[in-house]
Amino acid sequence: MREPTLAERIADELTQRIIIGDLKPGERLRQEVFAHEFNTSHVPIREAFLRLEIRKLAFSEPRRGMRVAPLGSGDTREIARMRSALEVMGLRTLSGRLAPKQLAKVKEALVAGDQATDLVAWEASNRAFHVALAELSLMPRLVDAVRDLNIAFSRNALRHGSPEGWKPGYSNDHQRIYECLESGDYNMAASLLETHIWHGERVSAR
């Protein structure tokens, strides 16, 4: 797997800041500020901004530059429908037994979630878990779509979640999905994943 470019790394960092609210809806994204912060030219910053726009995390205003996109209202169900369709389809394409090496990123995200000590860390590990599941399908376009949908889900979840009231916990759903993948029961893994996604939608929509 290739190493991410500088623009991709910057886009991922700015994505995380938008998700957790460090960069707020409507906030101006200035090329010169980030070029100075990341010690680079404006070229990778412009490319990073375009990636944010593709992810629907930023939008361009004529003669005013880029701004952080507003939070979507009432779109959690749409996100869940799309995640359910794509993520579940990804698991249903699997065949044969997966080697431990193939499941390593899934396991890593599972462990990170169990060890998370705050809501932001847990949400990042949850996102990584779902992207790692999608990567098992070996379908790059599906992976990109799942990544973007989980970014949108995380942004909504953190808007509704309370960092102060969050408590560390064990993700039984993730563990059961992992065990099914490990044993080669992909249909059960897909069914558990679908239920898990819709449960998450109900919680985040409260």
Image (cartoon, rainbow, N blue to C red):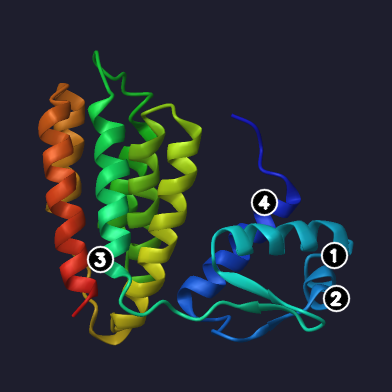
The residue singled out by tag 4 in the image is 8
The tag earlier along the polypeptide, 4 or 1, is 4
Mark 1 vs mark 3: in front? 3
Q: What's the residue at 62%, 67% (across, down)?
A: 14
**Res 32 label:** 2
Mark 4 vs mark 1: in front? 4
- Expressed as whole percent of the image width and height from the top left, the position of residue 171 reads 18, 55
Query: Judging from the image, what secondary structure is the residue with disc 2 in?
Result: helix
Q: Are marks 1 and 3 in contact (CB under 8 Å)?
A: no
The residue singled out by tag 1 in the image is 39
The amino acid type, in three-letter code, at marker 2 is Glu
- Expressed as whole percent of the image width and height from the top left, the position of residue 73 reads 36, 80
| Mark 3 Cα-neighbour bin, 10 Å: few <14, some 14–19, many ≥20 | some
The tag earlier along the polypeptide, 1 or 3, is 1
Residue nearer the viewer, 165 or 143: 143
Q: Quick check: 72 left or right of 160?
A: right
Q: Residue furthest right?
A: 41
The residue singled out by tag 3 in the image is 77
The amino acid type, in three-letter code, at marker 3 is Arg
Q: Quick check: 49 left or right of 95?
A: right
Q: Quick check: 140 left or right of 58?
A: left
| Mark 2 Cα-neighbour bin, 10 Å: few <14, some 14–19, many ≥20 | few
